[in-house]
Amino acid sequence: MTPPRVVVVGAGPAGVRAAQALVEAGVRPIVIDEGRRDGGQIYRRQPDGFTRTHAMLYGSEAAKAQALHEGFDTLREHVDYRPETLAWNVTPGQLHTVHASSGETATLDFDALIVCAGATDRLMPVPGWNQAGCYSLGAAQIALKAQACAIGSRVVFMGSGPLLYLVAAQYVKAGAKVEAVLDTAPALPTFAALRGLLNRPRLLLRGLALKAMLRLTGVKLLNAITPLRIEGTPEGGVAEVAIHDARGAERAFACDAVGLGWHLRAETQLADLARCEFAFEPLSRQWLPRIDADGRSSTPGVYLAGDGARLLGADGAEAAGRLAALAALHDLNHARGRTLFAAERMSLQRTLATMNGFREGLAQAFPWPHAHAAALPNDAVVCRCEAVTAGELRRSVLEFGSQEVNRAKAFSRVGMGRCQGRYCGHAAAEIVAAAASIPVEQIGRLRSQAPVKPLLMSTQEHE
Amino acid sequence: MSKPLPSAGSGGRFVRLAETGRPALQLLIDGQPATALEGDTLLVALLTHGRRVRSSEFGDGTRAGFCLMGACQDCWVWDEAGHRLRACSTVVSEGMTVRTTPPASLWPVTPEVAARERGEVFR
């Protein structure tokens, strides 16, 4: 029997654990990684020549990061690892890739494709967020983790979600000046949120400890805020963040950099191009690919794991990656894979159920403030790529009758720029839904297009 | 937490907090000599020297990158030959030359553009 051709996309927690399960079963997968090194975003490795320890880089998660890095190091000769490579399209049974610097392309036939594409920050536009000095929270963390830099000398963090406090705490520990942490979520979680968060009590305590540490070091922490605008100049960039506090009073925080983020959004483009079915997830108000309890998508041979499928965080991603890989081998009738799958399936599913309970708690404790999007002033830029305003987007609904996001995109170009809707798409959907007075789940879903990221015109695929 | 705050240096946006003992590299940014450290991304090299990466083509001011993970494409700059570089995922090398404005001089000049540059109306 010829060995199955399995391709893993991504080398974060899910991708690495998927690859490891495949190797254990005696299969040699191809691992496509857009990064220069394995680790993904959460366990991003610093370049050679940097000397900070795992403990300094990853804090309480240092042991997990180290285990994942060392795990992949031992796999290296058993997998066909392709770093700096973008998977830019999926067609039936084939994955299309291009190498970042050489431009070399490859068309990979697969029997099973395991997509572990991860997530990016979920962004809510704030008037002025298109100015220099505004970054995603993830960007602020990457600057520190991978380059030992702060994004500015006086930083404000605004948004919601666990990353908000984690990045702020990492900045304070590294010696950066954090002016304020501004959270749109209320200070006290609801009972339902708390019930979810108690699925992982230790993680909950760690989150509370981060907040306490920030408060002790004098960082201003505000909850239930409403972002008003980011002031600055077109030449100099950001200078101040203005908000309404919980009581509705206007307050301003001088700064030269802003980190923004409202938890995460799944990178689902490859799943979409593979024609996987999607479903609207009401708690987080985002469209996610349908998967079964093992990670099978609706497209035979395509498996989805990690934050690109369900936002369970790094620990959940490790379990989901392993389970999806074993499910793929089971479905391919691979003897050793079937044995491992049968032995581990229930325990991995139980882990994922716990993680999912916690995810539901997070989604409720740090809700996506969709009403802010609906209430954005007409002159606020929604699409950073092409500086398209909320007013132009509303005009596509009110004047041109777009009651569907892809039509609104065609009229307004929101979602059509360089980032292909990654940073404006969720807010744009809320704006269109509010303008059309239609629930957001009924205005459709922005369709992904290949290439999932811009390619050079000179890119050529060889048959 | 008690150590003095590092300054942003000579007008840079990013602040180096650690790992400053790496060997230095020389590069040219828009023709001006600049120093970076081995292992720096081009984005860090640009933003430890200045406060912008490029100007928006849509007239809303300067940009300095946004996601740092190759997703937003906000940090495109160009090498001397006119090849596009994504600054956040490009590692600086010794002698690198970057320009933060599109290399318009390398674009083909259409008769229409040539006429406009001469102050004439193309017909």
Image (cartoon, rainbow, N blue to C red):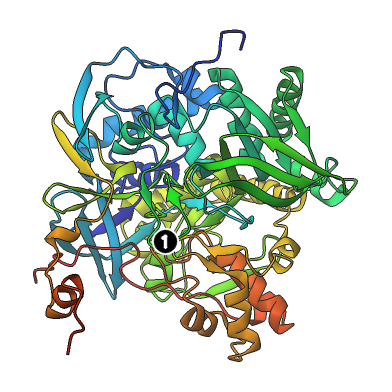
Q: Position of residue B52 (x, y in %)?
A: 40, 42
Q: Up-down: is A176 above or below A192?
A: above
Residue A30 seen in render = no
Residue sitting at x 38%, y 34%: B50
Instruction: Assign the N terminus of chain A to one quadrant of the image.
Output: bottom left
In the image as oriented, which residue stretches furthest toward the front? B119
Question: Residue lying furthest top in this view?
Answer: B3
In percent of width and height, residue A187 lies at 83, 40
Q: Secondary structure at mark 1?
A: loop
Question: Horizontal and vertical percent for residue A211?
Answer: 73, 28
Residue A72 can be seen in this image: yes
Chain of residue at mark 1: A
Q: Is residue A349 above or below residue A202?
A: below
Q: Position of residue A256 (x, y in %)?
A: 56, 35
Could you tell me how many numbered marks the image carries? 1
Is residue A448 placed above or below A327 in the rendered structure? below
Q: Which quadrant: the C terminus of chain A? A: bottom left
> Label 1, on which residue?
A419
Left or right side of A95 for B95: left
Seen from the viewer's position, the closer of residues A1 and A228 is A228
